[in-house]
Image (tube, coloured by chain):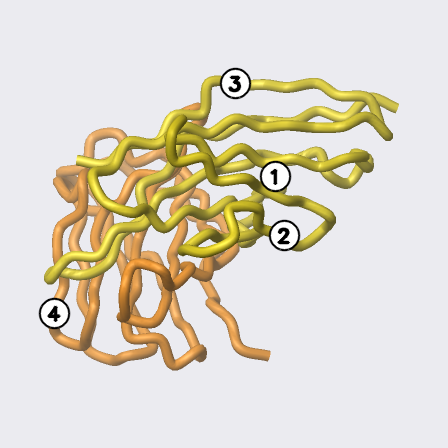
Amino acid sequence: DGGITQSPKYLFRKEGQNVTLSCEQNLNHDAMYWYRQDPGQGLRLIYYSQIVNDFQKGDIAEGYSVSREKKESFPLTVTSAQKNPTAFYLCASNKADRGNQPQHFGDGTRLSIL
Amino acid sequence: AQSVTQPDIHITVSEGASLELRCNYSYGATPYLFWYVQSPGQGLQLLLKYFSGDTLVQGIKGFEAEFKRSQSSFNLRKPSVHWSDAAEYFCAVGTFKAAGNKLTFGGGTRVLVKP
């Protein structure tokens, strides 16, 4: 079955360390997204990409970086500049069409600080 | 800029009772509206969507939602709640711009189901 795979499910970061969250999709979707979820705050958009080798900052991009070298993959790096990285991170994808295409979500990665 | 408000942070409902979750949006054009459900530690699953046409839309798991333009609302309803409906529910509005389409989410409503 087609879907979005996020790994790892749980991740721990040491102070000053960069960590990378993986997101892979086999839905043949053009667009991919990264969200951060904190309790009681809903989802906030970090980065999104409509096409390979191109991506845009979302609402809370500071301290994060992404790449989009392949259509299927959109990894997110949480850098040491992100001072409060503890959160649940969700990856999503959809057809890069009009705004009426629903986004499909992975099962998330929970990042904690050691 | 678009925004979505879900006024109720928590709702407790008895099993078998009806459920209504409120969603109000702010957007200058015709909105694309979505409801998602999230079980603990999981991703989001699409319940239903509204783009145009009939203002009452049916979704999965027995949910429906009604779009009311005059009230800028898109409330979610279920006639009879099951214990498995305990989850967090998110309303979202979609926008399309040259830079790509984006979703703006409300803060979510957590539903607790009493036996």
Q: CA distance from mark 1 to mark 3?
A: 18 Å
Colour used to depict chain A in the structure image: orange
Q: Are marks 1 and 3 on the same chain?
A: yes
| Residue depth check, mark 1 versus mark 3: number of the one nearer the observer | 3
Q: CA distance from mark 2 to mark 3?
A: 22 Å
- Label 3 sits on residue: B8
Q: Residue at x 48, y 67 (%)?
A: A5
Counting other residues with Cα less than 10 Å from the Cα at mark 2, is it few (<14), some (14-19), or many (20 or more)?
A: some
Q: Amino acid at mark 3?
A: Asp
Q: Amino acid at mark 2?
A: Gln
Q: CA distance from mark 2 to mark 1?
A: 24 Å
Q: Amino acid at mark 1?
A: Pro
- Label 2 sits on residue: B58
Dot 2 falls on a residue whose secondary structure is strand
What is the x, y in percent for residue A110? Answer: 45, 43
Q: Are marks 4 and 1 on the same chain?
A: no
The chain containing the residue under callout 4 comes to A
The chain containing the residue under callout 3 comes to B
* Circles 4 and 3 in contact, beta carbons < 8 Å: no
- The chain whose colour is yellow is B
Q: Amino acid at mark 4?
A: Asp
- Label 4 sits on residue: A54
What is the x, y in percent for residue B37? Answer: 57, 44
- Which is nearer the N-term, disc 1 or disc 3? 3
Q: Residue at x 42, y 60 (%)?
A: A102
| Residue depth check, mark 2 versus mark 1: number of the one nearer the observer | 2
**Please, is residue A22 above or below residue A14 in the view?**
below
Residue A61, numbered label:
none
What is the x, y in percent for residue B80? Answer: 81, 34
